[in-house]
Image (cartoon, rainbow, N blue to C red):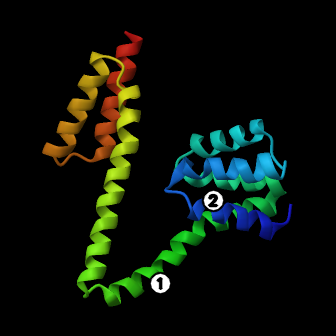
Amino acid sequence: MNFFLVYGLLLKAVCTSFSGLASLPMIREDFVVRRHVLTDAQLNTAVFAGRAGPGPNGIYVVSVGYFAGGLPGAAAGLLAVMTPAFLILPMMRWLRARAATPRVRSAIRAVIVATAGLLLAASLPLAREAVQGSLTLAIVIATFLMLVLTKIDSAWVMLAAAAVGVAANVF
């Protein structure tokens, strides 16, 4: 598949989605349903490969590019993931120059509140499904309290929560 076509399709999916796996329906439509470049199994493998390692949830786009066009496709996927970050910098400079106006400040505040609402709406169903008993509820509450009330690094808190969960399942 053509480098520029892979880049364009993946950029469209990345730019029009909220974040992470939100671009998955559009990518499936373009690569599996319309163009028959990927199978559902390959798309699942790409998502697994992107989610298995550290980094952003949307990095699976690089694997999709690889399945669609080999190494040039992977490069197109990487560029598609990086492009919005580079576009936001000039936009922020433009907005900062106009941030003195009350309309722009109000619009920025509205976007921040809307983003927080969307994150909360996406997190609550995940949290409901993840908390499957009194032990996990206790871990969630203890972790929340430790993060809010202490200055312990979040990595140590998560590591301790994971250790408690593993220890509870082993013993």
Q: Amino acid at mark 2?
A: Ala
Residue at the spot 72% in from the left edge and 62% down from the top edge: 9
Say if 16 sits above or below 58 in the image: below
Say if 125 sits above or below 72 in the image: above
Q: Pick whichever of labels 1 and 2 is earlier in the sequence.
A: 2
* Cα–Cα span, label 1 and label 2: 21 Å
Q: Where does label 1 land, which residue?
A: 90
Is 156 placed left or right of 149 in the picture? right
Residue lying farthest bottom? 97
Q: Amino acid at mark 1?
A: Pro
* Residue 55 visible in this rendered orientation of the protein: no
Q: Percent position (x, y) of residue 92?
A: 40, 80
Q: Nearer the viewer, residue 87 or 150?
A: 87
How many C-alpha atoms fall within 10 Å of the one at disc 1: few (<14), some, or many (≥20)? few
Residue at the spot 56% in from the left edge and 47% down from the top edge: 21
Task: Name which quarter of the figure residue 134 lies in.
Answer: top left
Residue lying farthest left? 149
Q: Percent position (x, y) of residue 151?
A: 18, 49
Q: Percent position (x, y) of residue 78?
A: 66, 63
The numbered disc on residue 13 is 2
Residue lying farthest front? 103
